[in-house]
Image: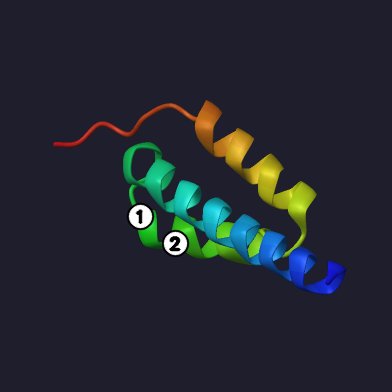
Amino acid sequence: MWSVLLLVFFVLFISVVTWLSYFLGQTKTENAKVSGIIGFLLSFIPPLGLIYLVILSLKDEVSTV
């Protein structure tokens, strides 16, 4: 029972970090797809995924021309 709950939490965490990385990458970087892939890879180590989201959210927005 606990292993299933832990697995569901881990999959939910990975999907939320990936989605937030992509969403923030749309406005904060020039390439949202790369930002989402980096977020996906870093989400397998939860502290690194959270640090990446903080750094990405504090970054200035990229101006579009």
* Identity of the residue drawn at 73% across and 70% down: 7
User: Could you say where residue 41 lies in the image, as x and y percent from the top left?
Assistant: 63, 66
Whether residue 47 sits left or right of residue 55 in the image: it is right
Horizontal arrangement in the rendering, residue 26 relative to residue 55 (left or right): left
Expressed as whole percent of the image width and height from the top left, the position of residue 64 reads 19, 36
Q: Residue type at mark 2: give it.
A: Val
Q: Are marks 1 and 2 in contact (CB under 8 Å)?
A: yes
Residue most extreme to the right: 2
- The residue singled out by tag 1 in the image is 31
In the image, residue 12 sits, relative to residue 21, either above or below, namely below
Q: Quadrant of residue 58?
A: top right
In depth, the one of 59 and 54 nearer the eye is: 54
Q: Secondary structure at mark 2?
A: helix
- As drawn, 65 above or below 37: above
Identify which residue is drawn at 78% across, 48% down: 47
The residue labelled by disc 2 is 34
Report crowding for label 2: few under 14, some 14 to 19, many 20 or more residues within 10 A (C-alpha). Answer: some
Tell me the amino acid under the disc marked 1: Asn
Q: Residues within 10 Å of mark 1 (few under 14, many from 20)?
A: few
The residue at the point 44 percent across, 61 percent down is 34
- How far apart, in angstroms, are the residues tagged by discs 1 and 2? 6 Å
